Structures are given as structure tokens and as C-alpha cells.
Amino acid sequence: MSALPDFKNRARAALADPVLKVAIDRTTGNAERKRAAAVAAFPEFEAARARGKAIKDHVTAHLDHYLELFERNATARGAQVHWAADDAEARAIVTRICLAADAKLVTRAKSMLGEEIGLPHALADAGIERVETDLAEHIIQLAGEAPSHIIWPAMHRTREQVAELFKAGHQPPPAAEDPATMVQSARRVLRQKFLSADIGISGANFLVADTGATCTVTNEGNAELTTTPPRIHIVTAGIEKLVPSTAHAFALLRLLVRSATGGEMTQYTTFHAGPGRPGDADGPEEMHIVLVDNGRTKMLANEFREMLRCIRCGACMNHCVVYRQIGGHAYGGTYPGPMGSVLTPVLDGLAASRDLPNACTMNGRCAEVCPVGIPLPTLLRAWRRRSWREGLEPGSLRAGIGIWAQLARRPRLYRLATRIGLPLMRLFGKGGWIARLPLAGGWTAHRDLPRPPARSFMDQYRARQKGRK
Amino acid sequence: MTARTRILSAIRTALGPGKPPAQIAAEAAALLDDPDAARPRLAAPSLPDAFAQKATALGTSIDRVASLAEVPRAMARYLDAHGLPPRFAMQPAPELAALDWSGLAPYPGIAPDEPAALGLALHGIAESGSLVIHSGPENPILMAFLPLHHVVLLREATLLPYLEDYAARLSAETVPRNAILITGPSGTTDIEGSYVRGAHGPGFLHVILIAEPG
């Protein structure tokens, strides 16, 4: 998936869509309240967060060791481990396995890594029918859309819109438009697919090095139904998903679920270690695990290493004032919101996505709620710095900042300019606010500017100092 | 150069020289020292009470019985209360087959739209109200996912306090193909964040908690 450069146009369109705003508010509002309650009910949350951060940093610091350990143990359990340096290699590996097995129907349990490497399109290009089994992914597959959130991919759609999609896409259509009836309808339609699929593809929330198991969490139960009946199970996972042991996975799980949905545990936490064993009542004959780099080793070597801690909970976007106005699609990449604005420049290049790190108010809420302490605003600033250094910022901005820098380096000139500027600005003020100001239309179109005082801070300070003597 | 070599060499270039595996293992273990500092307290002092409290809060129903012999009657009660037929899918485990099922009709195997199934849990976890199920010759995984009503036998003696206590029992040698922690009935919040039960898995999860030591 690549970010289109016209972020501003997409954001403008999203802002003008009142239905989208309703849909975003319903889901993120719920998520914010539930997360707050879950954290309040867990007084050890801060200690757990420090531990989670330390676990992820430990794995990052010994990533080669853990990858090799995982490979050894997964192979010993009968899984076939594949390595992909980038998205194209990952797509090729999965497609090759599907074609070699002569697969006609593939079921997929939601995986953002699968979206990142463009798996849906690759399967379509190979002529393989792909059925998304997560309810939200099922909704957006019917709509022909990409996910707009990493936990609730269809959160941009209201129940009324989902009802329209199901009426057109389900045979027979659901009898009513309430969520319960629509969920039942999806259950019926997808059940036939689960049992007739040739291959099931899932992602992984964790890769457990000491057992060689992959761990996936779901609330619906679609992961097990995706991975059990077909002859082949394929897992695609980023190399940063490693944990030393099952106990380390649980320490992170306590943070992940509370931060994502406000629950304590997902309904299903499932560990897969290799294909079915001799005598097993069910399970696939083959298990393949595709370990994907796709920019992660680059992050290990640069200022974005801390982003490798991300456990994809979505709390940063649920609490982001920008995301909550424009939703996920406006960002244009696979991952939206604050974490997406850090990752998309890695995946799609900064030139195509330089607007994203700027679409941030630096209010810091994302970092406050991040369960593994990623300093997201600092990382976004790092992209802004790079964008400046690489000359990607537009000429008008560079010129404006150049002029300001000239002034700021000359204190007397700067004070003179403020002495001239302040009274001029005050001319446009009504009451305490300025509603319209020449050269500042971008600001005043959407909000007012406080009317400045008649004298600058420096002038007032000097006057007071004199008064004291 | 293979992708594997490229990835590992890029990592080693970024990280510099590595530490001996024994030292890495010791550091990893130290990260989990003092587990109580970073996990929630149990909901009640006794494990069965703590488990029952958590499980009930998540929508799991619980029937506490004294012994395994009482299970058929508890199952009949549950089927009756939900208007379900006496025929249900049952996990092919010898200890279940050995019970007196007169009046009911358990059968091995599972249909895609099975109304009810009865199975055994390997453990319960008191911290979270979770049931642990392992795949195996006597344990088809689909039995926990296809039925609308999933009834699970759990012995109090197999209850573990915390997630870590279960993790300690899993090693490369003991991990099954599929280990699942089931925490409440299947659900989704994918339509406007409103909670609906029975998304793909069972809409009803019922635990028969047996006090008698196994």
C-alpha cells in the first residue's frame, strides 16, 4: 500500500463528511472510556508498562538471537520458516505456497502485516478467492475498501451503511438492521467458507522464541476457524513480534488488550506450534511462517528504533485529536494515526508522506496512552527534521522560516518587529479574539487567534523591573 | 545472498557484537522478576471463587457441582434450560464416555451448525477466568468453535492462579499444535463498537466446575 501525496485533499474531504464523524466518534469514544476504566482497575498498570517496554527493548537488542531461536524451535515443531526482506518477497512466498497447493479458496484472519505487504491484491492477481473472516474485514471486503483502523478496520462505517452492504452481499440478506442480526448473517455466510477453504492465512501478535509457537488474539474465534480446517496454515509476521517465552507474551498481552479494547483478555488467545501431530483429531498438514523485514532492520539502525516496540493496540489513534477528525483513510497508508505517521514514511518513503508527521498537534496524548512508552511526538518531530534536511518542505515554508530565523537571531530587530506588529494585529481584534488576519487565513479559517496585548512580554518585563528599583 | 542472510546481517550491523545466549536468557528471566508488581490481584482469595467471578463477569455461566458423576445431570439441566435437544456433540475422552448418560444422547463428531457440545478444559486460570484447551487425539479444536453452546468441564484441582503459572507448563517439548485460552463467549464490537455475542464461535459458554479432586 502506498500513501498518495494529496493528504490535504483527503483530509478536507473527510472533514466535510458528517457521517464519517459520527462513525469515528461512536467507536473511538467507546474505546477511550473502556481503556480508561481498564487501566483504573489495574493499579499495577504503570509497572506493567515499564516491564512491557523493557521486554520489547530486550528483544530488539538481541533480535538476531531470538529470530534464530524461534526458527529452530518452530522448525523442530514441523513448521516451515521463510524469510522475506521486503513486501514483494513476502507476497511472492505466500503466492507460491498457494499456487503449489493448487488453492482455490483462501480464508484470512485479520492481519495488519498482511495489509502492509499487499497480500489481498497479490492473492487476487494470482486468481485465488480470498475470504476475509474477521467481521470488520468482511465488511470492508464487501465495500472494496482498505482498513481505516488497526483494531476496528470498518469503524468508518455506520450500522446503516453496514446493513446496505450486507443486503447486497449476503444470500439471503439479513432480516433486520440491528448489529446482532447482521452478525448472525455474517456467521452463516462465512461458516461455509471456513470449512471449504484450502488454505488459512493468519498474522501473529507474538512469535514465542522458546516454544516456536505463534500467538494470535481474537474476540470472534475466526482465527481458529481459519487455521484448523484447511490443509495448509500460513502465518505472516513482522520480525519485531518476537518474545523470549510464553510468560513474556502474557506480560505484553495484559497491556495489549486493555489498551486496545479496554478488556482484560481477548476471548481467544491462541498459540500455534507447527502442523497437526500424528493422531491429532484435527489441524492442518502444513504450517508455514513468513518472517517479514520490510523496513524493520532499517529502523533498528536509525532514530526510529523505539517504534519497533509497537504492539499494534491502536490506543494512540483512539486518543488522537487529528485521527478523530479525519479517520484512518485520510492518512493514505496501511497504518493510520500517530503510529502510522511514524511508520508510513518508513514503508512508503518520506517524499510521498511528509504531510503525515506534520498532521499532529504535539499534544502528547498518544505517548501518554502508549502501553510500551513509545515517544511518538519525538519520533514525528524526527521525521519533520529529516524532511527539512532533505529539502522536502515547500519553498514558501522554507522562506518564511528563513525570515523568522533572521529576525530571531537579532534580538533588537526582533523586538522592533514585535513593537510594530502587535498594534497592527490588534487592529483586527474584536473582543479578545482575532477572527480574520491577512497572511494567516490558514489559521483563522478554522479558529480564532487570541488578540495580543498592546505591549510584548519583553517590554512589560522591562517596565516591571524598572518599577521595582 | 538469501533474505535470511540479508536480514540477519542487517540486524548484526545495527546492533554490534552480541552477548552469549546464557547471558541473554538470564536477562530475559530477570525481566519477569517479582511478577506480582506488574499483574492484577485475584478477584477473590480462593481460586474457584476468583475464577468464577471473572468468568461470570465476561458472560460465561457457571454451574458448580461436587463430583464428576453429577456432570450428566448438570448437562441435562443446561440443555433443558436453553430448550436444546438431548443429543449433543461430546469430546471423545474416556472419562466422559465412562459417565452414565442415560436420558441424554451424546455423540462423537461435530456438525458445522452444532447446537451444543461438551468438552474438557485442561486448566482454568483464576486471574482472567480463562479456560485452557490443547489440541490432541482426543481433542478436536473445532469442538470449541462450531457449536452455538459450548459446555466445558473444569476441575477445581486444575485451576492455576495466574497466566504465568500456565506459561511455566509450556516448553518446546510440551507445547501442543494448538493451545487456546478461552475467555468468555465469542463476541465482536466491529459494528459501531456495540458488543454482539456469537460472532463466529459459541454465543454461549457454560462451565461445569467440579469440586472433587481429580
Image (cartoon, coloured by chain):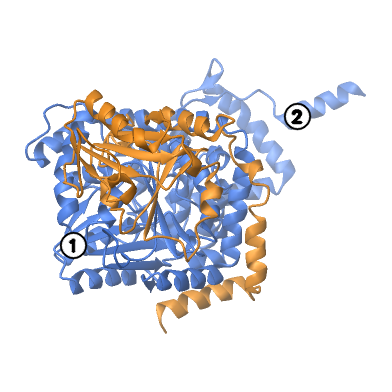
Chain colours: A blue, B orange
Disc 2 marks a residue whose amino acid type is: Asp
Residue B169 shows up from this direction: yes
Instruction: Estimate the x, y position of residue B99 in percent, counting from the top left.
Output: 30, 41
- As drawn, is B47 to the left or to the right of A88? right
For the residues marked 2 and 1, what is the alpha-carbon distance in whole angstroms? 77 Å
Seen as rendered, the residue at the extreme top is: A431
The quadrant in which residue A155 appears is top left
* Mark 2 or 1, nearer chain start: 1
Pointer 2 local density, CA inside 10 Å: few below 14, some 14–19, many at least 20: few
Q: Do dots 2 and 1 share one subunit?
A: yes
Q: Which mark is residue A198?
A: 1
Disc 1 marks a residue whose amino acid type is: Asp
**Chain for numbered disc 1:** A
Instruction: Determine the residue positioned at 21% across, 68% down.
Output: A98
Pointer 1 local density, CA inside 10 Å: few below 14, some 14–19, many at least 20: many
Residue A437 shows up from this direction: no
The quadrant in which residue A271 appears is bottom left
Depth check, front residue: A139 or B152: B152
Can you identify the residue that label 2 sits on? A459
Q: Quadrant of the C terminus of chain A?
A: top right
Instruction: Estimate the x, y position of residue B184 in percent, counting from the top left.
Output: 37, 36
Where disc 1 sits, the SS reads loop
